[in-house]
Image (spheres, rainbow, N blue to C red):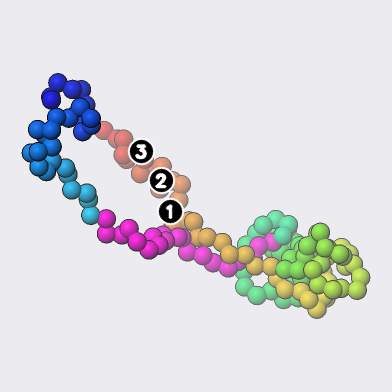
Amino acid sequence: MSDRKYRQHGYQDSSENKSKGTSQRPKPKSQDMTYGPRPLNMPGARTVSRCAQCGALLSGLMENDANCSKCGLALHSCKMCVHFDPSSRFECRQPIPARVFPKDGPNHCSFYEIRQAVERETTSGGVRATDARQAFENLFKK
């Protein structure tokens, strides 16, 4: 029945084709890694502290009277603390007796812990925009 457009098995097949035995089907490809979780290819992570006002990266351990090198925000202030929460009572998650004001000014709170965040390392070391541009131009040179 080669006159049909699609050579698929169906109700129009004659009994002769079925009696021939096995049809030639391609064997499925081997799937070795079909079980278990896939391996992750995640970029590296690092723990950093950033200024709450300007976002500058803060380096090393801070003294109690230190300020941000870029904008001058006091680093021992409520805005830089882990427990700072504008929606909480007195804008702090800890049970403090009175509101501390101003939130960006230096204070001597006993609950203070500097805020740290885990960031992904998305930059490749030493690659600059000019290197990428040069590689692109080299690709299309004659």
Give coordinates of residue 24: x percent, y percent. 12, 41
Seen from the viewer's position, the closer of residues 124 and 115 is 115
Q: Which mark is residue 61?
A: none
Q: What segment is highlighted magenta in the picture? A: 31-51
Disc 3 residue type (three-letter): Glu
Mark 1 near mark 2, Cβ–Cβ under 8 Å?
yes
Residue under the image location 22 percent in, 49 percent down:
28
Residue under the image location 76 percent in, 68 percent down:
83
Disc 2 residue type (three-letter): Ala
- In the image, is 119 to the left or to the right of 124? right
Q: Which mark is residue 137?
A: 3
- Mark 1 → mark 2, Cα distance in angstroms: 8 Å
Q: Is residue 37 magenta?
A: yes
Seen from the viewer's position, the closer of residues 79 and 32 is 32
- In the image, is 131 to the left or to the right of 86? left
- Mark 2 → mark 3, Cα distance in angstroms: 9 Å
Q: Farthest residue to the top: give it.
A: 3
Give coordinates of residue 103: x percent, y percent. 83, 63
Q: Quadrant of the N terminus?
A: top left
Q: Farthest residue to the front: give it.
A: 15
Q: Which mark is residue 132?
A: 2
Q: Which mark is residue 127?
A: 1
Give coordinates of residue 115: x percent, y percent. 69, 67
